[in-house]
Image (spheres, rainbow, N blue to C red):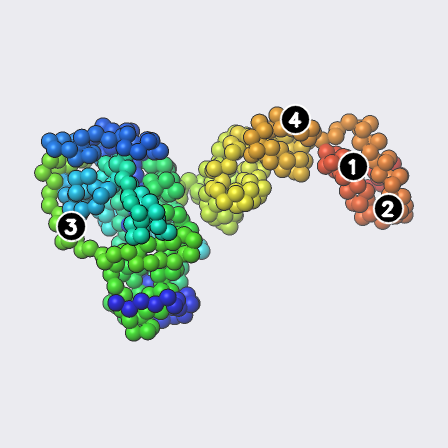
Amino acid sequence: MTTTTTLMPYDEALERYEPVLGLETHVELGTASKMFCGCATTFGAAPNTQVCPVCLALPGALPVANEKAIESTIRIGLALNCSIASWCRFARKNYFYPDMPKNYQISQYDEPLCTDGYLDVEVDGTVVRVGIERVHLEEDTGKSTHVGGATGRIHGADYSIVDYNRAGIPLVEIVTKPIEGADRLAPEVARAYVTELRELMRALGVSDVRMEEGSLRCDVNVSLMPRGSSEWGTRTETKNVNSLRSVERAVRHEIERQAAILSEGGRIVQETRHFHEDTGTTTSGRSKEEAQDYRYFPEPDLVPIAPDPAWVAELKAALPELPSVRRKRLQQEWGVSDLDMQAMHNADAIDLVEATVAAGAPPADARKWWMGELARRANEAAVPLSDLRITPDQVARVCALVASGALNDKLARQVLEGVLEGEGTPDEVVASRGLQIVNDEGELSRIIDEVLAANADAADKVRGGKIAAVGALVGGVMKASRGKADAARARELILEKLGVSA
């Protein structure tokens, strides 16, 4: 095995090698109970409180398949343009980890529920069709925590503890066919695919797909082949990548790492690797098992699955509007450019903008605040837009206050700040901070008189015909009113007082 800490620059790597990708995405289904028992699936419960003889694999406990999980898997397969098996069954996947109570996992092997589909994704204006090899249903494992040491992994830890609450939660694995031809866009294609897949799961309502909670995890497979060759290289599998940005970074790093090894005459070892968020790099985990290492055989305690074709047809007819179709519809309704729509998509803001529009805000105003001030604050806090402490209804109310003349943009930003800091609704923040625009003509006239008296030179320039100089006077009014004056009305009154027509 040859290793190197040197990376080949990305552009050079792509001049010499062509990447081939494969993505295995695991989606925890949002069912009320586990896959083969009646235990709850609530995230964050106290360790080992959502367990029973079945998911702990106590002697004599027998599994019963969760019908809702099977239905959700079929709906996923249909949305991914897959063929649905008329007959399939579960298999035992044998491996001996502490987080597997049975010392095997109930999964599907050579007879998956859904096969041969595709998902189209768009990158830089180009549509890439990602083939889907299979969609199969299995159970999740427990969660191991390695205490002590510097890495949080088992090597170097003082001891390990296991929480079996997650063991047995329904887990769908979506496996792509090898993705060729992505070339220099390979990292972006990988990210776009997982992004689109996540949106599809949300649209179907089968999972909350919160990557930070592990309900969507991605294994990233990368191999390189020399330009002009038709033989794929040896692949590596980077396990459990848990953010969209990290999917892209993992692909890019593996391309640069593998290219450096191959250029030095080394060979790539088929192995699993770990991704490190802090450095954007991968490190070796363990040698990669082949299918025969798991000693698959049919699960003897479960009957086969034979979905009724009429039921499958009903599920297909009831599928919701798919994300790509919805984006095109909203783009037309909102009258935004391809670039603006892509920006909202990348920021995961489409749902928020749509909900704000549904609450009464004009599309342009809703997009302006979510993609401007609120996106800035989300970036500063390093959180998704959806995690900000403000609702679409509240943003719509701010839009309405601006449209009515009660607020200007500067004051509206202060109102948003107050809402985000937990000071109440937009109206409550306006009242408590005293942010109403000064609409009283008498008060505004008084402020203008003070500004004109303090800025006689600028006033004389305006009287002399230099209308542009009025900007400084308006600025003085806004400063004196702490941004609460109506700037347009202030300009009109200034010109009137100076005897100048606009």
Report, in whole angstroms, how far the alpha carbon at label 2 lies from the one at label 4: 35 Å
Q: Amino acid at mark 4?
A: Ser
Q: In front: mark 3 or mark 1?
A: 3
**Mark 2 crowd level (few <14, some 14–19, many ≥20, 10 Å Cα):** many
Q: Is residue 403 left or right of residue 189?
A: right
Residue receiving disc 3: 294
Residue receiving disc 4: 432
Report, in whole angstroms, how far the alpha carbon at label 1 lies from the one at label 4: 20 Å
Q: In front: mark 1 or mark 2?
A: 1
Q: Position of residue 502 (x, y in %)?
A: 82, 41
Report, in whole angstroms, how far the alpha carbon at label 3 lies from the one at label 1: 75 Å
Mark 2 element type: helix
Q: Amino acid at mark 3?
A: Tyr
Report, in whole angstroms, how far the alpha carbon at label 3 lies from the one at label 4: 65 Å
Q: Look at 76% across and 38% down and name the residue there.
A: 478
The numbered disc on residue 282 is: none
Residue receiving disc 2: 458
Q: What is the total number of numbered labels drawn onto the structure image?
A: 4
